Amino acid sequence: MERTENTETIQSKAALLKNHERLDELHRNGYHIIQDPGRFCFGMDAVLLSGFAHVKKNEIVLDLGTGTGIIPILLEAKTDGSHFTGLEIQPESADMAQRSVQYNHLEEKVSIVTGDIKDASKIFGASSFDVITTNPPYMIGQHGLRNEADAKAIARHEVCCTLDDILRESAKVLKTGGRFYMVHRPFRLAEIFSKMVEYHIEPKRMKLVYPYVDKEPNMVLIEGLRGGKSRLTVEKPLIVYEAEGRYTQEIYDIYGY
């Protein structure tokens, strides 16, 4: 009997995947996610954002530029939010995300919408979410860009949307007092804070991420509050590696190992 079940599982996975896709374990609730190494696979930044974001019971969450749907799926596993929506402009990535949702039987809790971040307020309406998360493209404009149609380029460069687009639409679809969570690069912090304030999303919490304790930070996690008052808390830094090839305990806890 066990052999039959294993064979059925293998056949089910094979039918689920397309081309060069693979099914990766998330180490949360037995969930898996479909990824295509030729397009773009989620990285540590998405996992760290899912650990940094606070989602309260019954809150409704929107992830802008969801890619393979990693953040909505992880937040569903980690929090008591009532519903999670991922917005993704690339149809192929949205399709993978939708199939991951179906594979994990999360259709009632997670929705994937194919659409443009620049149209988020038209798609969802004003003041429709309690929480927004986003792991946006880090690189400005054409810096180092070779092919604007390439899926990896779209994920890494501001080809399809800019920081302004993200913050403008977030300000519209967030409820008053709603929270905004983003992972980005420290070299753009001055611009990020300036634009957040411009769009009335007040920076409230920040955590710098260092690869090693003696290296410069290479990521920053930011929380903003729509309509909040000016007061920023800088949390203790997050160190990724305690030695070559060995994560710190905090990273293991975030991953769920």
Image: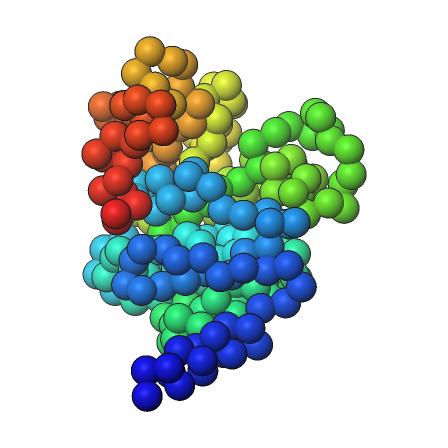
- The image quarter in which residue 90 lies: bottom right
* Residue occupying image coordinates x 64% and y 35%: 157
Residue 233, image x, y percentages: 25, 26
Q: Depth check: 40 or 10 in front?
A: 10
Q: Residue furthest top?
A: 214
Left or right: 115 as drawn, with respect to 144: left
Left or right: 140 as drawn, with respect to 10: right
Residue 105, image x, y percentages: 39, 75
Q: Is residue 224 above or below residue 116?
A: above
Quadrant into which the N terminus falls: bottom left
The answer, for residue 202, to whether it is visible in the render is no
- The image quarter in which residue 18 lies: bottom right
Q: Residue furthest bottom?
A: 1
Residue 171, image x, y percentages: 46, 45
The answer, for residue 68, to whether it is visible in the render is yes
Q: How is the image coloured?
A: rainbow
- The image quarter in which residue 202 lies: top left
Residue 26, image x, y percentages: 37, 55
* Residue occupying image coordinates x 64% and y 49%: 39
* Residue occupying image coordinates x 34% and y 19%: 212
Q: Is residue 174 above or below residue 213?
A: below
Q: Is residue 15 above or below residue 249?
A: below
* Residue occupying image coordinates x 30% and y 16%: 213
How many marks the image carries: the answer is 0
Q: Depth check: 80 or 205 in front?
A: 80
